[in-house]
Image (spheres, rainbow, N blue to C red):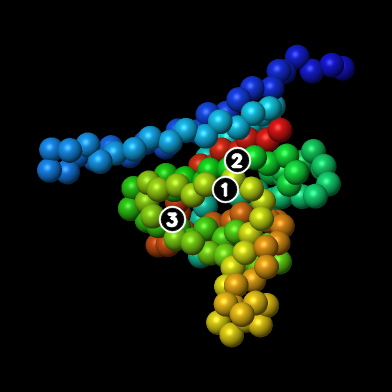
Amino acid sequence: MASTISSANLKVKITEEVILNGKDQGSSNTLTIGSINEVSSRIITAPSGSFTTLFNITTTSSGSAGNFLSSSLKYARITNKDDSNHLRLRVSGSVTTDVIVDAGRSFIITNTSVSGSSSGSTTTAEGINALSDLNSVSVEPSGSAVDVEYFIANT
């Protein structure tokens, strides 16, 4: 079976709008990512009290839902859809990096390399671990369950 889907460009536009002292201080930046032929979008309710895996990154094609090939992933956005609770976003590879995503905010991934730091690390002089391949992205809400949206674009 030959596909009838043609690849397309994904345009990601980030716009800041703010006027200070009567002067527009905003900015707009657009990133165009070519040859996108797969997208995945989902909203999931993550219960509080433990981490919920949103998706996995693999080095071999499995064709399974929620698994994305590392060489094909070009863009991922994770958005906290809650109006009051933050969530802890965990980006895991051979190292783990956690970030807080406040209510209504987003986190963007544009490649599958991840690094982190740890106190007293001997990996490098600065305590920063070497880049490694991303394996999974998971979330843990604070307080109560949180709706989380992800959008992923692949080539």
Image quadrant holding the N terminus, namely top right
Numbered mark located on residue 109 in the image: 1
How far across and down, in percent of the image, does residue 55 sit?
A: 65, 48
Snapshot quadrant of residue 34 = top right
Give me the residue at 67% from left, 68% from top.
Answer: 130
Numbered mark located on residue 75 in the image: 2
Q: Secondary structure at mark 3?
A: strand
Would you call the spot at circle 2 few (<14 residues within 10 Å), some (14-19), or many (20 or more)?
many
Q: Secondary structure at mark 2?
A: strand
Image: 1 above or below 32: above
Query: Contact, CB < 8 Å: mark 2 with mark 1?
Result: yes
Residue in front for this viewpoint, 59 or 89:
59
Numbered mark located on residue 101 in the image: 3
User: Type of residue at label 2?
Assistant: Tyr
User: Type of residue at label 1?
Assistant: Ile
Residue 143 left/right relative to 35: left
Residue 34 left/right relative to 1: left
Give me the residue at 68% from left, 35% from top.
Answer: 154
Would you call the spot at circle 3 few (<14 residues within 10 Å), some (14-19), or many (20 or more)?
some
Give me the residue at 60% from left, 32% from top.
Answer: 33
How far across and down, in percent of the image, does residue 97 sit?
A: 57, 65
Q: Secondary structure at mark 1?
A: strand
- Tell me the CA gap for discs 3 and 1: 13 Å
Residue 143 left/right relative to 78: left
- Identify the mark nearer the N-term, 2 or 1: 2
- Identify the mark nearer the N-term, 3 or 1: 3
Image quadrant holding the C terminus, namely top right
Residue in front for this viewpoint, 46 or 120:
120
